[in-house]
Image (spheres, rainbow, N blue to C red):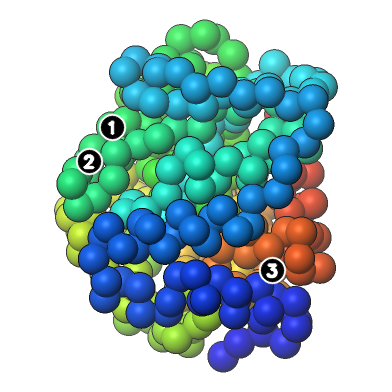
Amino acid sequence: MKPSEKEILAFQARCDAFYPPDAVDASVAQQREWYDALCAAFSPALPSGLTYEDSRVAGVKTRRYRPSSVTSETLLLYLHGGGFVVGSLESHHSGCAEIAEAVGAEMVAVDYRLAPEHIWPAQTDDCYTVLKALLSEERPVIVMGDSAGGNLAAGLVLRAAGDGRLEYIVGQVLIYPVLGGDLGKGSYIEMAEAPGLTTADVRFYADILGAPSDNPIAHPLKAESLAGLPPAYITAAHFDPLRDDGRNYAARLAQAGVDVTYREEPQMVHAWLRARHISPGAKEGFRALTEGTKRLLR
């Protein structure tokens, strides 16, 4: 199954030219080379007046964005996607900059360690180290991320809840997240061969990460309780095997009494955020994402 919007189909065809559908069969080094080239091809100029600076937070490499107009004291903590295997500060640079600018809040993006050189829990540990440092500033924080980064974001919120550190976490924004759903059910079957990401790809990334199958920090859908978590904005793509992870997590949050907004982009594929300047559907999804994030600001 595939969408009918011609712009998102053209976007996916261009992505496939850089990062072939069977990329997971190549070496990790080759995957990263292809992914970096893909990201560079979809990296427009940064918003005018926005500045950024690289630094280390508690030893972890980060990039801090300051938009041209800061209208909130809330910090955004962004965790990039890439299946825990590819991706970096550079791969999501323009997207992070545009989110920060549109929301009017400073953002800290994390360059966490990647698999297979570093298996789980290295990724969540790096991100949690940065989160704890930001929380020590006693400013409100929204934790957000896309795809694998959405997994890390949801896991960080659960981890903070278990440690009694939710006081300053005012929101979570999960963008087409992978959350540990059953690969033999729902959208993992219906969208198994979806453009941009297949169920076989999801299995490959899970295997290479090496996270315990029963750990809720790695698989947030397996958490016993979601009660008391901060408000959430969750967006999923209809043509994505991960769709039901976002849909089901939103439903569970709502059942637990958490304020949650769920939006499913009807014509979008996985990683549609990169198409925000090309596709009408992605442009609207990006607008809704930034507006949804604004509503979580304190």
Classify 156 as above or below 188: above
Furthest residue in direction top, as rendered: 137
Q: Earlier in the sequence, mark 3 or mark 1?
A: 1
Q: Callout 3: helix, strand or loop?
A: strand
Question: Which residue position holds label 1?
Answer: 125
Residue located at (73% from left, 54% from top): 286
SS of the residue under disc 2:
loop
Q: Is residue 187 above or below residue 171?
A: below
The residue that appears at 43% across and 76% down in the rendered structure is 20
Instruction: Please name the residue shown 63% across and 57% down the image.
Output: 42
Disc ID at residue 261 = none
State the quadrant of the C terminus: top right
Closer to us: 74 or 231? 74
As measured in the structure, the alpha-carbon distance from the residue carrying label 3 to the one carrying label 1 is 31 Å
Quick check: 166 above or below 250?
above
Q: Nearer the viewer, residue 176 or 256?
A: 176
* Type of the residue with mark 3: Glu
Do callouts 1 and 2 mark residues in contact (Cβ within 8 Å)?
yes
Q: Residues within 10 Å of mark 3 (few under 14, many from 20)?
A: some
Residue 202: horizontal and vertical position, in percent? 35, 69
Q: Are marks 3 and 2 in contact (CB under 8 Å)?
A: no
Horizontal and vertical percent position of residue 256: 51, 48
Q: Residues within 10 Å of mark 2 (few under 14, many from 20)?
A: some
Q: State the quadrant of the N terminus.
A: bottom right
Quadrant in which residue 138 is drawn:
top right
Could you tell me the amino acid type at mark 2? Pro
Q: Which residue is mark 3?
A: 265
Q: Residue at x 45, y 26 (%)?
A: 62
Q: Residue furthest bottom?
A: 1
What is the x, y in percent for residue 36?
46, 54
Residue under label 2, please give it: 121
What amino acid type is highlighted by mark number 1? Asp
